Image (spheres, rainbow, N blue to C red):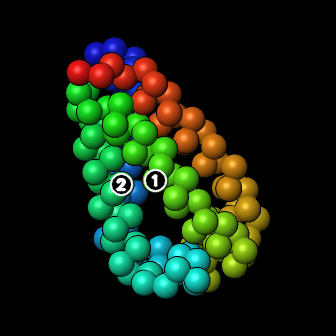
């Protein structure tokens, strides 16, 4: 197995884990949806489905390029929820670090390496 395959599979696992968690603990995610968007449950479920789709695309070498770019788009699209979480000072009634204002603000820049990782996979994946 090549190093690029390991990276691709690792990101696929991250995306799959995030997607599954949207269905296991949807209320956690509903609380960080920006209020102006409304339809919290629908948005949580839709983003979970998209994350699972990204994971599936990443896991297949033939569709990894599309999966990488789809992951980039998704990570950018969900960033407002992370901002909402920080503005709210974390998620009330959640465990640490999700309930911490400092941790919520500190995690915002962590989206950058995730986006970079997905873009790197997209750029390095061959179109088949």
Which residue lies most toward the right here? 102
Residue tagged 1: 74
How much space separates mark 1 and mark 2, taking CA atoms?
A: 8 Å
Q: Secondary structure at mark 2?
A: helix
Q: Position of residue 89 (x, y in %)?
A: 72, 76
Horizontal placement of 105 versus 75: left or right?
A: right
Q: Position of residue 126 (x, y in %)?
A: 33, 19
Horizontal placement of 108 versus 30: left or right?
A: right
Quadrant location, the C terminus: top left
Q: Position of residue 70 (x, y in %)?
A: 40, 45
Viewer-side label of 1, 2:
1
Does the CB distance between marks 1 and 2 fall below 8 Å?
yes
Task: Say few, some or many: other residues with alpha carbon within 10 Å of mark 1 (under 14 / 14 to 19 / 20 or more).
Answer: some
Give the residue drawn at x 25%, y 26%: 61
Labelled disc at residue 27: none
Q: Is residue 21 visible?
A: no
Q: Is residue 38 visible?
A: yes
Give the residue drawn at x 68%, y 56%: 108
Residue tagged 2: 51
Q: Position of residue 113 (x, y in %)?
A: 60, 39
Q: Secondary structure at mark 1?
A: helix
Horizontal placement of 7 versus 107: left or right?
A: left
Quadrant location, the N terminus: top left
Q: Nearer the viewer, residue 114 or 50?
A: 50
User: Disc 1 or 2, which lies upstream in sequence?
Assistant: 2
For residue 86, above or below residue 77: below
Give the residue drawn at x 38%, y 49%: 15
> In the picture, residue 10 is in which quadrant?
top left
Which residue lies most toward the front here? 127
């Amino acid at each position: 197995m090549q190093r690029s395959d390991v990276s691709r599979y690792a990101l696929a696992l991250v995306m799959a884990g995030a997607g599954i968690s949207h269905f296991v603990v949807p209320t956690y995610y509903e609380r960080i949806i920006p209020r102006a968007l409304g339809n919290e449950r629908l948005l949580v479920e839709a983003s979970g489905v998209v994350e699972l789709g990204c994971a599936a695309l990443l896991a297949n070498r033939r569709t990894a390029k599309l999966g990488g770019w789809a992951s980039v788009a998704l990570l950018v699209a969900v960033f407002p929820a992370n901002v909402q979480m920080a503005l709210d000072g974390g998620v009330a009634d959640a465990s640490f670090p999700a309930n911490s204002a400092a941790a919520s603000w500190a995690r915002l820049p962590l989206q950058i390496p995730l986006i970079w990782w997905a873009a790197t996979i997209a750029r390095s994946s061959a179109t088949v």
